[in-house]
Amino acid sequence: MAGETILSVKDLRVRFRTLDGVVEAVKGINLHVDAGETVAVVGESGSGKSQTMMAAMSLLASNGEASGVVDYRGKNLLTLGKSELNKVRGRKISMIFQEPMTSLDPLYTIGNQLMEPIRKHRGLSGAEARAEALRLLELVKIPDPERRLKSYPHEMSGGQRQRVMIAMALANDPDILIADEPTTALDVTIQAQILMLLAELQRKLGMAIVFITHDLGIVRRFADRVYVMRYGEVVEEGKADELFASPQHDYTKMLLAAEPTGRKAAPADTAPILLEGRNVEVEFRIGGGFLAGPPMLLRAVDRISVTLKQCQTIGIVGESGSGKSTLGRALLRLLPSQGMIRFGDKDLSKADRAEMRPLRRELQLVFQDPFGSLSPRMTVGQIITEGLLVHEPSLSTKERDKRAVEALLEVGLSPETRNRYPHEFSGGQRQRIAIARAMILKPKVVVLDEPTSALDRSVQKQIVELLRKLQADHDLSYLFISHDLAVVRAMSDYIIVMKQGKIVEEGPTEEIFGAPREAYTKTLMAAAIDETKFRQSA
Amino acid sequence: MFLYVFRRLLTAIPTMFVIVTLAFFLIRVAPGGPFNQERGLSPEIKANLEAQFGLNDPIWLQYFNYLKNLLHGNFGPSYNLPDFTVTELFANGLPISVQLGLSALALALAVGTVLGIVAALNQNKLGDYSVIALATAGSTIPTFVIAPVIQLLFGLTWKLLPIGGWGDGAWINKIGPILTLSLPQIAIVARLMRGSMIESLRSNHIRTARALGLSDWSVVVKHALRGAVLPIVSYAGPAAAALLTGSIIVETIFAIPGIGRYFVDAALNRDYTLVMGTVVVIAIFTIAFNLIVDILYAFFDPRVRYD
């Protein structure tokens, strides 16, 4: 399938001028793309994989500059004038991005946005461009395309928006489609659909695809050739199957082994029940108000019962909007809910804020976003000891400091970090800080809301291992909320599958993964199947 | 949409009622009354005057009488300018203040928006720094400095403009006041526009537009600008309400017979009816412009839906 080389990148360097001086994001890399092939550029965050392609398309942020050669069919894109460049961008080389929710202009209809590049590059009349836009929406399988032309982006789901992005990118029959993490922001079932669509369109239209991704499942399934990047350099390149069969560079080997492994055994049947919810219900009111009529009720959690034993980890899986985070918060009484909730021998259902406060130290929560959940104006020491001020006010400053040191050591951070600020730490380190903040109070139940989703695979694995060790050391019970089946499988001994606020299926982990009964669970599994297979072979 | 506007107008009624009630009682809480300042006023005459204007009635009766008159569109007589009713004062002064305010607002929006865009497109370059310097100067130099400087330079030194006066609405008389009113607004609009344009240019859909090979004109004007004007629209509403109801400083310095000076004069003189009239006019303008802003929002941003 591969033909002549159409794009070659030679000694590309990308620098950013920042307040801390010049940062070199890409350090002289070489790569090439042949007609019709699929190339994957793999790496973890900060590896420079996205900036490489942004530089090639002259889309760097205003403080960035690129040097070297990006040769597209004899033209160096880096030195091309604006109007010449715009004959290549969107025409010969086009791009789709990670953020389908924000990559379309919210103020114009889909039709308007689709027609604009068509008219610009091909000089078609309005009516011709409209017909072309309609054909493209059909090509990317958007239902009811005629009506969708008049829709605004906010009226469509993430998956549909990504389809529109693909339609826009393919509008002018490009040679190369650059897909920058095209499915990362989407639910697993939607991810699979988008990837299938891309593969099908490639067969039909014959363009080359460059996948920029951290997801080895995608690489294994779709790529002909792979470039592995780290710290702005290409550390290994080669044919995909060869690279997976016998990785040469240590970093590649580490990436391949970074899938979380291992299984958790169920707690003994005699283990005491710690947290119990019966028919828990959460409703949100939408709209309504003075003279605006009654509000709409959205039932985010619909009569769900959960029993969490000591030392147990219950994995709650589901796609975005399934109500899994809401359930976690309702069980901790962070949201008003209906139904019965017991913690040990206390009934939490009627407990108000003041009654809940002493219990909070035993019921902790760790959030998904390690960047947003730590106050940027407090030192790490202040952040993790803040809970002690409330729950153990009798501690002296010295004792608190001692506890901070213990907690940091426990999560694998050096005690000196307590005098520094969150922005000085990486995503994985921040998540460790967030875990230390929960652990310092010596809780019994921790709700982990997507604690690994914002992290790279290799870091995920470390966090999973840390959480396991803490559980074993302190007899903790976890509610582990995640959409990532590989991590859930490695962490939990019991699984609840949620959809639209209801439990679709529940049972011990091996039963759910081994023999899912419900159609929805099977779809979820099928979407993630490559990852699972891959993990078993690695 | 029609229903929404209707509903908003309906909610304006209780809002107006609350404002009128608060203002009515607040001004009466202040010590003194409309006829206390007049020197040499014998007690008999003062009592006569107060009886004539119903100021001896119990306060609740005064309040209900005022509400009744107001519902008939009658603001009552001015206590301190006895030759005029409040309605007449506004009929004469309001068109003048509105004219100056509207012109100043239009000028500020036009110039400020352009300056802001220029600055955003030249971020951290000379063009940007010049606009920021201008904007900082514009918003820090007070009106009571700008106005005399304009009078001094254009009126006395170069003799291009009249120093003051309304001149029966001759356009040359309006230039000074309009400039003075608009300079601080230009500064604010330019800074707002710069910020929101920079943010807009950084957004993901602008990256998409560039990746599609669209021209700079389309990227900046069609895609970046439309989203970036929204903060200007929200600012322009309250700003319009303030500008159109006149400025005491500008109207005093340029000797313009607008309504801007009434608010302060009337409050100082305890001219109850004139204070109330000013409050009602400002409230109506504020409510109206907020509604206009919300309608414009729906026009600029399809995500905003009113139903």
Image (cartoon, rainbow, N blue to C red):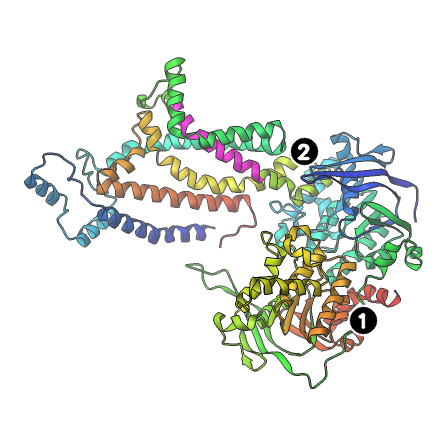
**Residue type at numbered disc 1:** Gly
| Residue for point 45% across, 32% down | B140
The subunit carrying tag 1 is A
Q: Residue furthest bottom?
A: A270
**Residue type at numbered disc 2:** Asp
| Residue for point 18% across, 50% down | B62
Q: Position of residue B123 (x, y in %)?
A: 62, 33
Q: Does the stretch in magenta take in B180?
A: yes
| Residue for point 47% across, 41% down | B235
Q: Position of residue A393 (x, y in %)?
A: 52, 67
Q: Quadrant of residue A305?
A: bottom right
Using residue A260 as the reference point, say whether residue A240 is left or right of it: right
Q: Quadrant of residue A254?
A: bottom right
Q: Is residue A135 visible?
A: no
Magenta stretch, residue numbers: B175-196
Q: Main secondary structure of the magenta part?
A: helix
| Residue for point 68% across, 47% down | A103
The subunit carrying tag 2 is B
Separation of residues labelled 2 and 1 (CA atoms): 53 Å
B204 or A383, nearer to the observer: A383
Q: Position of residue A162 (x, y in %)?
A: 71, 52
Q: Secondary structure at mark 1?
A: loop
Few, some or many residues within 10 Å of mark 1 (<14, 14–19, 20+): few
Q: Which residue is mark 1?
A: A262
Is the Cβ of the residue at disc 2 closer than 8 Å to that at disc 1?
no
Q: Position of residue A343 (x, y in %)?
A: 58, 78
Quarter in which the C terminus of chain A is drawn: bottom right
Q: Nearer the viewer, mark 2 or mark 1?
A: 1
Q: Is residue A436 visible?
A: yes
Query: What label does residue A36 carry, if any?
Result: none
Q: Does the stretch in magenta take in A304?
A: no
Q: Which residue is mark 2?
A: B216
